[in-house]
Each structure stands twice: as structure tokens, then as C-alpha cells.
Image: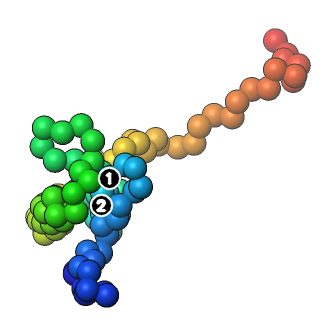
Amino acid sequence: MARRTGGKRRVRGLYYREGRGWYGNFRTYAAEGGGREALIPRNAKHPTRDQHVAMALHKARLDQLRQARKDGALAPARWPRRAGRRPAARSSSMPTTT
């Protein structure tokens, strides 16, 4: 997960957005509810700007998603599937017969 590059520790899936703070890329775990997420500490409103806090939050969220995948827990579908197709919209320029 972590590798050394040029003396700095780099965590895969962790990135800094200039002026905004640290974010985590958890799209690998999209089926379990992961995505691109702001790493917000408890009792805070904005993403952290401290790299060490971000690494700890990233690890905690990654462990949570790994456990969800292991348990087979899936996030609920965002949009329910409809049976069949939608009816075609009627055009107002078409004459109607009654």
C-alpha cells in the first residue's frame, strides 16, 4: 500500500487538493459504498490539511471498506430499477385525434 519515493512516504489513493485539503480515492470499493471522499476528522466541517491525520483517516476508512467487502455487505442501489421501458414522450407539435 505504501511505498517510498524520493524519501517521502506516498500512500496510494490519498491526494491533496490545493486549498481544500486531503481526499481519499476509494473507487475500488464502489460496490461497498466507496468513492472519492473528503477525509474529514470527527467534529470538523472541512477536510484535514494535516498529512498524518489524513493517513490515519484513510487507513481507518480503507479498513472499514475492506471489512464490508469481506462480510459481503453491499451499499443500497442509488436508483431503483424500473420494470420495462418508459413510455415515449408525446410531442406537442403532433396532431392528436379524438
Q: Is residue 69 visible?
A: yes
Quadrant containing the C terminus is top right
Q: Residue furthest top?
A: 98
Mark 2 packing: few (<14 Cα in 10 Å), some, or many (20+)? many
Disc 1 residue type (three-letter): Gly
- x and y percentages locating residue 28 in the rendered image: 32, 68
Residue lying at 59% horizontally and 37% vertically, measured from the top left: 86
Which of discs 2 and 1 lies nearer the camera? The answer is 1
On the image, the x and y values in percent for residue 83 come to 47, 42
User: Residue 36 lies in what quarter of the image?
Assistant: bottom left
At a point 15% along the width and 58% down the height, the residue shown is: 53
**Camera-nearest residue between 68 and 88:** 68
In the rendered structure, find residue 24 and report the number of the disc placed on it. 2
Tell me the residue at 12%/43% (across/down). Answer: 42
At mark 2, the secondary structure is strand
Depth check, front residue: 19 or 93: 19
Residue 5 in picture, x, y percent from top left: 31, 87
Horizontal relation, residue 31 to residue 73: left or right:
right
Q: Quadrant of the N terminus?
A: bottom left
Residue situated in front as seen by the camera: 31 or 10: 10
Residue 21 image label: 1
Q: CA distance from mark 2 to mark 1?
A: 10 Å
**Residue 9 placed where, x, y %?**
23, 79
> What residue appears at the point 30 percent right and 66 percent down from the top-left corner?
14
**Rendered image quadrant of residue 29:** bottom left
- In the image, what residue type sits under mark 2? Gly
Label 1: how many residues lie within 10 Å, few (<14), some (14-19) or many (20+)? some
Q: Nearer the viewer, residue 6 or 78?
A: 6
